[in-house]
């Protein structure tokens, strides 16, 4: 089986040549039928014209004897009968006239009230004569008369056999019973019914011809059902005698123009198809050459090789395609450079993050930030202070990409520069907000922040929340959660806002602090279900006795399973601290 065309050359040949060839075949069929009909109609007109001349000659030769014979047998004075009889005997071709008077004692097959003339003949034209018979019965049925006129068939035919059209064709006559009439001196003959031995007509065709004669007095009949039959019969039925004149014509000669047309059309179609193939191949070769160059260049582009733009001095669609491809290549090169820059920025950004783990005799902290793009807007920081404090910071800049990454780096740098010298967390966050507003006033960008401090000397926990997700405080001994929320406005929105430092006294025992960005709780699975804070608390409860790193690994694994390994739509940042 043939598969679908794969190459451009095959597709061009299939989708263009197929309808063209179908059109050529349809035109050939329509033209063939039209010309065949026209030639057969022309042959019919010619044949009927020739037969009409013969039929008129024969019918004229029969019409006068039949008319006179009918008058002879009607009731007329004796002198008229003698005159009619003498006139009939002088007609050319009349051989014998017999008159018979019947007495009432003579049996009659049927009483007649008018003269009836019938034509008799021997099927084999014995004596080469045709007999006209007429009889008449008087109304009183006392006397009746009959007449029989014998005519020479040769004289009836006359000079017709010497006509060029007659001598050049096979011509014969059929009677009502299908007998072939053929005097020896004209080219007519009674042959066998075998279609291979009879030069005239086979039994099967004779039957078909008789059926046609019964429906129409003139017409033609092909000898077979072939488009170009070997023999075509033309016929014309006589009115004055029960005969049908038949002409046998050579189908090859009649339909020769049709065969000439067919071969000429076939040759022309082949030449047109070959020319179209050549032109299509030429056109396809040029297109394929350009397409190959585009494919090779695209392949090199995919591997990072930006070559010299393609050169094609054409104003058609292919030229426009090459121009668009060169423009795309230039844009792609810029995009690749930008992508490399973004990747480098992402690496730098990850380098800005602190070491993920901090651990001493009292505190244990671990953090992770997973950007949804090459660069993210989240950050975390674990800042130990020589004053016996440990600061945990999480920020979330609105948006993604390079802009968010730059604002994140600025926010982180401001926090680090202010946290060492600030009297408290509120003044630190207020100073960062004031400085950040100067950079974000025109862009409308902002950042949320959660900053928390732990002191080794006491059990007081202090924090400031600037529009960020509340942190969770978990008491391992009691198994209870406390949310560190309070109010706070995001950074970079209002330079005059006053932030408040919040604090809580930790009871004796082991505690766990979890700070996360909203990319964790807002994460959705395939069914649109949010990850949520409750699910986060359940994981913390289950792994609370493990290290901070182990707890964070369990949370990340659960997030990955929940998202079905899909890339998250927001940055995910988590910091976990354990207080012993």
Image (tube, grey):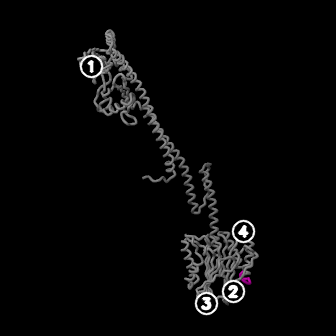
Which one is nearer the viewer's eye here, 318 or 419? 419
Splitting the image into 4 quarters, where does residue 394 fall?
bottom right
- Determine which residue is flagged by label 2: 386
Range drawn in magenta = 418-425
Q: Are marks 1 and 3 in contact (CB under 8 Å)?
A: no
Q: Which mark lies nearer to you, 2 or 1?
A: 1
On residue 443, the disc is 4
Q: Earlier in the sequence, mark 4 or mark 2?
A: 2
- Determine which residue is flagged by label 3: 509
Splitting the image into 4 quarters, where does residue 85 fall?
top left
State how far apart marks 3 and 4 are (Cα). Answer: 47 Å
Q: Which mark lies nearer to you, 4 or 2?
A: 4
Residue 397 screen position, x and y as percent: 67, 73
Q: Which mark lies nearer to you, 1 or 4?
A: 1
- Determine which residue is flagged by label 1: 127
Which one is nearer the viewer's eye here, 110 or 244? 110
Q: Are marks 2 and 1 in contact (CB under 8 Å)?
A: no
């Amino acid at each position: 089986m043939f598969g679908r065309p794969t190459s451009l050359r095959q597709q061009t040949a299939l989708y263009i040549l197929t309808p063209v060839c179908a059109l050529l075949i349809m035109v050939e069929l329509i033209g063939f039928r039209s010309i065949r009909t026209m030639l057969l109609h022309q042959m019919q007109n010619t044949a009927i014209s020739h037969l009409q001349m013969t039929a008129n000659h024969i019918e004229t030769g029969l019409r006068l004897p039949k008319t006179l014979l009918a008058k002879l047998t009607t009731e007329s004075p004796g002198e008229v009968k003698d005159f009619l009889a003498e006139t009939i005997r002088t007609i050319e071709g009349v051989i014998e006239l017999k008159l018979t008077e019947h007495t009432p004692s003579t049996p009659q097959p049927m009483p007649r009230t008018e003269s009836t003339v019938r034509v008799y003949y021997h099927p084999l034209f014995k004596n080469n004569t045709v007999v006209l018979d007429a009889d008449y019965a008087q109304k009183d049925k006392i006397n009746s008369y009959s007449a029989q006129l014998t005519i020479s068939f040769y004289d009836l035919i006359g000079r017709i056999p010497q006509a060029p059209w007659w001598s050049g064709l096979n011509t014969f006559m059929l009677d009502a019973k299908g007998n072939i009439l053929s005097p020896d001196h004209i080219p007519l003959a009674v042959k066998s019914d075998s279609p291979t031995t009879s030069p005239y007509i086979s039994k099967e065709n004779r039957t078909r011809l008789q059926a046609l004669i019964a429906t129409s007095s003139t017409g033609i009949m092909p000898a077979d059902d072939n488009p170009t039959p070997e023999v075509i019969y033309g016929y014309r039925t006589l009115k004055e005698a029960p005969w049908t004149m038949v002409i046998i014509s050579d189908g090859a000669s009649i339909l020769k123009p049709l065969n000439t047309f067919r071969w000429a059309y076939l040759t022309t179609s082949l030449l047109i198809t070959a020319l179209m193939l050549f032109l299509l191949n030429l056109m396809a070769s040029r297109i394929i050459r350009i397409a190959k160059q585009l494919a090779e260049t695209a392949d090199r582009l995919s591997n990072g090789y930006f070559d010299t733009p393609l050169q094609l001095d054409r104003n058609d669609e292919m030229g426009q395609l090459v121009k668009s491809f060169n423009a795309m290549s230039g844009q792609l090169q810029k995009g690749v450079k930008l992508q490399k820059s973004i990747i480098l920025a992402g690496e730098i950004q990850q380098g800005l993050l602190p070491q993920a783990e901090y651990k001493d005799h009292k505190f244990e902290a671990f953090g992770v930030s997973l950007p949804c793009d090459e660069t993210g807007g989240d950050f975390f920081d674990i800042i130990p202070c020589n004053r016996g404090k440990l600061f945990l910071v999480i920020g979330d800049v609105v948006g993604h990409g390079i802009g968010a990454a730059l604002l994140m780096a600025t926010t982180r740098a401001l926090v680090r520069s202010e946290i060492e010298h600030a009297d408290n967390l509120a003044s630190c966050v207020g100073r960062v907000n004031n400085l950040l507003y100067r950079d974000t006033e025109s862009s409308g960008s902002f950042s949320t922040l959660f900053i928390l401090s732990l002191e080794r000397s006491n059990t007081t926990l202090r924090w400031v929340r600037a529009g960020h997700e509340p942190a969770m405080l978990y008491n391992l001994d009691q198994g209870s959660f406390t949310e560190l929320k309070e109010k706070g406005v995001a950074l970079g929105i209002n330079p005059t806002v006053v932030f408040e430092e919040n604090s809580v006294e930790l009871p004796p025992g082991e505690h766990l602090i979890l700070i996360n960005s909203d990319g964790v709780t807002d994460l959705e699975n395939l069914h649109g279900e949010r990850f949520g804070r409750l699910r986060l608390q359940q994981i913390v409860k289950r792994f609370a006795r493990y290290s901070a790193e182990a707890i964070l690994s369990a949370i990340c694994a659960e997030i990955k399973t929940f998202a079905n390994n899909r890339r998250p739509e927001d940055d995910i940042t988590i910091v976990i601290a354990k207080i012993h």
